[in-house]
Every structure is written in structure tokens, then in C-alpha cells.
Amino acid sequence: MHLSRFAWLGLLLLAFVIDTLECAKILSIFPFKGPSQYICVQPYLKTLAARGHEVISVSAFPQKTPVKNFRDITVIIENADHDEAVSNVVKKMSQSKLTDLRCLNEYVVMGTLSALKNEDFQQLLHSNEHFDLIIIEVFFQDALYALGHHFKAPMIGISTFGTDVVIDQLVDNISPVAYVPAPSGANLDRMNFWQRLDNLYSYTMELMYNHLVMIPEQQQLYEKYFPNATLNLREARRNFALLLLNQHYSFSWPRPLVPNAIEVAGMHINNTRNKLPADMGAFIKASPKGAIYFSLGSNVKSVLLPKNVLVALMNAFAKLPVNVLWKFEKTDLPGKPKNVYINKWFPQSDILAHPNVKLFITHGGMHSMIEVVHHGKPIVGMPIFYDQYLNVAQAQAKGLGVMLNFRNFTSEDLCNAVLEVLNNPMYAKKAEEASARFHDRPMTPLDTAIYWTEYVLRHKGAPQMRVAARHLNFFQRHSLDTMAVLFGVPLLVVILMIFGTCKLLRSLLTNKGSVKVEKPKKS
């Protein structure tokens, strides 16, 4: 594998750092059932363990084989409960902004409770164990943000879908509403007046719902499961030393980031392509015009889709002159076309790395979009909920593919979209250009994440990276108090001057218009 001089410099720097840093004890919490969220951080946690740090991982995905310096605490979320929650999200999403936020909150509370109710995790909470660092997924499960204060250790948050106005608050980052799109919307960074108005509405709804509904619910969980806590939850959630963000400006857009908010998109991708299973590889090679890959991600299961949607998909695939790999969670699919290969799980990155795979039909999840850009493949996007609409809209705007409405597409729509992207070389060219920009960095994403993690350890929480806004209240942070003085006092002076002038004029006019009547003299 060819490495640039910057990559070699990064590797040498990391090699030097490992000799100067004592090994740390690290607690990692990723409580949600979605495999993609844990896939994003697993190589990062394993690398920390390989560098000598002791890692305790709280997740729904224990290691299948033992890993040195790595211990699992397994949270249990019943598959039926998780599938039902995701199905409800798919059905209800996009009905209204408020409905979207309610569905999100239900999912978040389920994930938070899966950790807090876990017996092994509770034993850990009430033990005398010491940790040097807490690594936690930041996905609105604020009750768990108390762990830093509980164990008296610095916290690193990892956002597996990038940042938004709520996550920004954890390190006092800013999201200028005029040009930073809300992830739950579909506006890009260059907006007209009405789009900026819509973006403001999305931001306002997200902030209000988070502070009026989600945080109070998390506060109740915090008080129940941390009864001896002395720190207010609103203070605990602003106690992060570092945020690692699964995003990169080369694919999304340039935006302000404080020093302790670091972009590490792609840190989960192995740059060495693994060999595919023989039958899978043969199926891909057997398609002279190239093969395509179709997946709705790890949360939305194709097997649970309505029958009319399955029929539309199969009819579209049957018309295509290429072979199709489809992530389908059963071993049989009645009516499956001959050019379709189904499997419960695919090594997605290795599939996209195959030179004969020409297109990805995707739901537009952040991990899938990052892998698409990493491997330089065009897409047909069929977003389902939350940030997926914006991810696909951004890809379409950059010329990397086209978007379809998942809720009302026909087989003809899908077939035409696939043929458009396959037959027009512009899409593949734009995808290759985006990939080149994505890879052009001084250090690999994983090396970057490891460097800044150990930086926090070396500098005892790295307080020098935190902006002073964390010590200010809402009015101070937004300069409302100073603006009140700056603009309020002059305004008061002007009002008093106007009032005084009016009173003076009235007095003058009254005196000028009056007639002096002399009293008659007494005889």
C-alpha cells in the first residue's frame, strides 16, 4: 500500500507517542442495537487495546473471539423490540417534524435504558474501579453523560453520524443557521430565503424538543440511576474533553469547529481489501456490465418491507442487465430474479471496493455514504429517515448519483434511475473526484482519532482545547446581556430625549397660545 509522506509522518508520530504515554484504563459505552454504530468505533477501540490500553466495552456486540486488553459488558435488547421500534420509525417518519422527534426520542430512551438496567453495568457503577477515560456515543442519551463526573475521568464523545445543533452544545461549537443545514432537513449549505427560514424552523424545533422533552426525560433517568450525583445533568452534558465526529468537509461542507471537535470520517474502514467468499466473488465477476449492491443498512431490514415494495424491487432488478447483490435477512425470497444474490449480511466495504461493483443502491446512512466516497462509487439513494435525506441530497448535488422517494417509487422509477447512473459516465467520474478529495489528508482518520484520544490522556483532559463558553450561561454566551446595555441604554436615552423634547414643545406651544387676562382693578 502506497503512503504519502504525511501518512508516514503520522505513523512515526504515533510510534513515538506510544513510548511516552502510560497505558490507560478506558470505559466505552455504545448502548444501541444498530450494528453500524458499533462497526464505526470497533476498529478504534481495538486499536486502543492493541496499543496497551485496557478497554471495557459496554455494547450489544461482544467480541466473538477474545481480544487482548479488551473486556465486554453485553447489553441486551431483544431483536423483536428493536425491530418493532425501527418499523415504527419507518412508518411514522416524515409525517411531521414533531413525529420525527418523538420517534427519535423513543429509540434513544430504549438504548439508554438498555445500559442503565444492565446488571453488570450496575455492578461497575457501584464498584471502586478507576478509569482514566470515558468514551461514549453521543446520541441524545444524556443520562449516560454523567459517567465522566461519576468516575472522575475526562470524556470523549463519538458521534457516528456527524454533528448537529444539539451535539455542538456538548463542546460549545456553533452551527450558524444561515449556512449549516440541520441534519433532519433537506437543505444544503447554500440556501435562499425560504430555505433559510425552513432551516431556522428545523433548528428551533430540534433545540426546543431536546431541552423541553428529551433532556427532562433523561434527567429523570439520571436521578434514578445516579441517586448520589451532585452535578446537574445540564452541567454534566457540557463536560466533554473531545468530540470525534464521523463526518468530513470534503463530502459534506466546510463549517466552524472548535479545537476539540475533530472530523474522523472513515476511521472504521480497513484500507486492505479482504477476499470475498468464493460464490459471492464469482457472482460479481459473472456480470459483464458490472454488478450493483443494494442495502438498506443494519437497522431497516428488507425482510420486513411491505409486499408491494418487495415486488417493486424485484421487478426493477429483473429488468436490469447486471447482477444485483441484495442484503436480505432470510435465506429464501419467493419470486427472486435469477440475477439477484441474497445474503443476510455482506462485507459492505469489501463489496464496494471490488472493481466490478459499479453502483450502490443505498438508504443514505452516514456510514454507507462514507464508504461510498471512500471507494469512489456512485449511488441511487432511497433515504428513509433523519439525516439520510440530507446525505443523499448532498450526494446528488455533487453529481454522485440520484435520489428516489422510498415511500412511493415504482419499479420503473428504480430501473430508470439505476440505468441513468450506470450509463452516464459523469456519475462515476464525480465519485472518483470526491474520493480523491476525501483521501487527501495528512493522517488517516483512525490515526487522527488515536492521536487526539491519547492527547487527551497525556494532558489530563486537555482543558486547553475547551472554549470559555462552557463557563457562560445562555444570556452571556449569546451576548444578550451586553447587547441589552449596548443598544438598550442609547435607546433609553433617545426615548427620554424624545419625551423631554415633546414635553418642552408642548409647554412652549401652550404658553404661546395662551391669552393673559388681567384682573380688574378695585375702585
Image: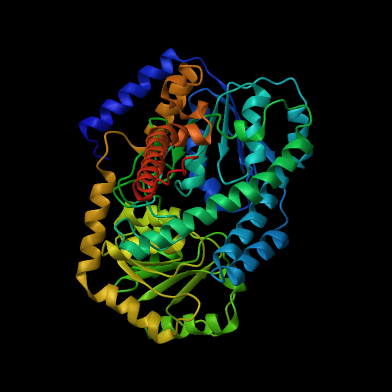
Q: Position of residue 59 (x, y in %)?
A: 64, 43
Residue 321, visible in the rendered structure: no
The N terminus sits in image quarter: top left
Horizontal side, residue 327 vs residue 141: left or right: left
Horizontal side, residue 517 vs residue 226: left or right: left
Q: How many marks?
A: 0
Image point (61%, 40%), residue name: 65
- Is 261 placed above or below 139 here? above
Residue closest to the far front: 523
Image point (31%, 46%), residue name: 249
- Is 237 placed above or below 516 here? above
- Describe the colour scheme in one phrase: rainbow
Q: Where is residue 64 in the image (x, y as percent from the top left)?
A: 62, 44
Q: Position of residue 35 (x, y in %)?
A: 57, 52
Nearer the observer, 360 or 276: 360
Horizontal side, residue 328 vs residue 486: left or right: right
- Is 477 placed above or below 321 here? above
Q: Kindly indicate the quadrant of the structure image that contains residue 417.
A: bottom left
Q: Where is residue 68 in the image (x, y as percent from the top left)?
A: 58, 29
Q: Kindly indicate the quadrant of the structure image that contains residue 92.
A: bottom right
Image point (33%, 44%), residue name: 255
- Is 106 placed above or below 219 here? below
Residue 9, visible in the rendered structure: yes
